[in-house]
Image: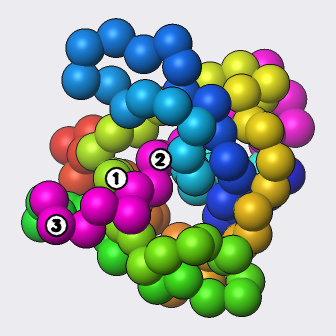
């Protein structure tokens, strides 16, 4: 389990407008947090690219990430979960995708 890995993730139970069901998510936690913390921080991935917000990051399906469709990362919907919610590894995002996420995070938290 590493930053940039994409896992099928269980988002249930959800409340209100939170993401629902099992869906891919990209791990954004750093190596130390992955090793030492009981929670893992992810961003959900959706294949519904029709509702793209300006900050969302498009991710094309490729053999490395093993997504079924071209999709997008909903970067504003950051979640921290118990690691047991990660069902199975699908693949790994390209470094360029991780760089876009790293560029976004300070904006999200107004750092």
At 67% from the left edge and 59% from the top edge, which residue is drawn? 6
Classify 96 as above or below 57: below
Secondary structure under badge 2? strand
Q: Are marks 1 and 2 in contact (CB under 8 Å)?
A: yes
Which residue is labeled 3 in the image?
A: 50
Report crowding for label 2: few under 14, some 14 to 19, many 20 or more residues within 10 A (C-alpha): many
At 48% from the left edge and 76% from the top edge, which residue is drawn? 69
Report crowding for label 3: few under 14, some 14 to 19, many 20 or more residues within 10 A (C-alpha): few
Q: Position of residue 26 (x, y in %)?
A: 58, 55
Q: Nearer the viewer, mark 1 or mark 3?
A: 3
Is 83 on the left-hand or right-hand side of 109?
right
Residue 28 magenta: no
How far apart are labels 3 and 2 at the CA level?
18 Å
Which residue is labeled 2 in the image?
A: 43
At 34% from the left edge and 11% from the top edge, which residue is drawn? 15
Q: Position of residue 101 (x, y in %)?
A: 42, 64
Q: Nearer the viewer, mark 3 or mark 2?
A: 3
Q: Earlier in the sequence, mark 3 or mark 2?
A: 2
Q: Position of residue 96 (x, y in %)?
A: 51, 85
The span shown in magenta is: 32-51
How far apart are labels 1 and 2 at the CA level?
6 Å
Residue 39 visible? no
Which residue is labeled 1 in the image?
A: 75
Secondary structure under badge 1? loop
């Amino acid at each position: 389990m590493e930053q940039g890995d994409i896992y099928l993730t269980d988002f249930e139970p959800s409340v209100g407008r939170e993401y629902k069901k099992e869906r891919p998510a990209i791990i954004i936690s750093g190596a130390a947090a992955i090793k030492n913390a009981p929670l893992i921080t992810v961003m959900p991935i959706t294949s519904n690219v029709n509702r793209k917000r300006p900050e969302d990051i498009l991710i094309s399906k490729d053999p490395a990430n093993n997504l079924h469709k071209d999709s997008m990362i909903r970067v504003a919907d950051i979640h921290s979960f118990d690691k047991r919610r990660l069902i199975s590894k699908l693949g790994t995002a390209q470094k360029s995708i991780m760089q876009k996420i790293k560029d976004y995070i300070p904006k999200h938290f107004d750092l």
